[in-house]
Image: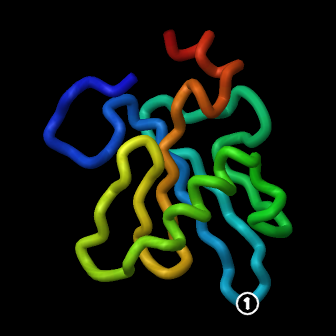
Amino acid sequence: MSEPHDSDLPYDDSIYRIYINPHTNVTELSCIGIEVDRTHWHPGKAEYPSADDLPMWMQEKIALLMMTPLDKPTVAIEGVGKRIDANVYWVFRDPVDVPWLADYIT
């Protein structure tokens, strides 16, 4: 898992930026960081018809982040992510969330 460090962000840079369009619910997903995930279901950036079409582990983390306040600065939830604004979320990936990915990271 993550090593101790001063930042709220995961040490291994496994972050997904998720934007949910408030009018259409179309969801844009970008994988950012050094270990960009291009190995499975999206090539670094993808668009989904709805947030309901995202993998369940992402939906669960976004649901939790939607309950966090929008007051700046927003605070990261360890192992979950960070709400950037009303429609943008950073979701932290963990090998537990994507079991097949553990082989690529370890």
Looking at the image, which residue sits at the far bottom?
23
**Neighbourhood count class around disc 1 (C-alpha, 10 Å): few under 14, some 14–19, many 20 upward:** few
- 6 horizontally vs 66: left or right: left
Q: How many marks?
A: 1
At a point 41% along the width and 70% down the height, the residue shown is 84
At a point 50% along the width and 64% down the height, the residue shown is 65
Q: Quadrant of residue 63?
A: bottom right
Of the 4 image quadrants, the one containing the N terminus is: top left
18 over 44 or under it: above or below:
below
- 6 horizontally vs 50: left or right: left
Q: Position of residue 3 (x, y in %)?
A: 26, 24
85 over 4 or under it: above or below:
below
Q: Nearer the viewer, residue 71 or 26?
A: 71
Q: Identify residue for label 1.
A: 23
At a point 51% along the width and 51% down the height, the residue shown is 91
Looking at the picture, the colour scheme in use is rainbow
- 103 horizontally vs 89: left or right: right
At a point 53% along the width and 38% down the height, the residue shown is 93
85 over 56 or under it: above or below:
below
Does dot 1 land on a helix, a strand or a loop?
loop
Q: Position of residue 67 (x, y in %)?
A: 49, 73
69 over 39 or under it: above or below:
below
Q: Position of residue 27 (x, y in %)?
A: 72, 67
Q: Position of residue 73 (x, y in %)?
A: 24, 73
Query: Please, what is the three-letter code of the amino acid marked with disc 1?
Result: His
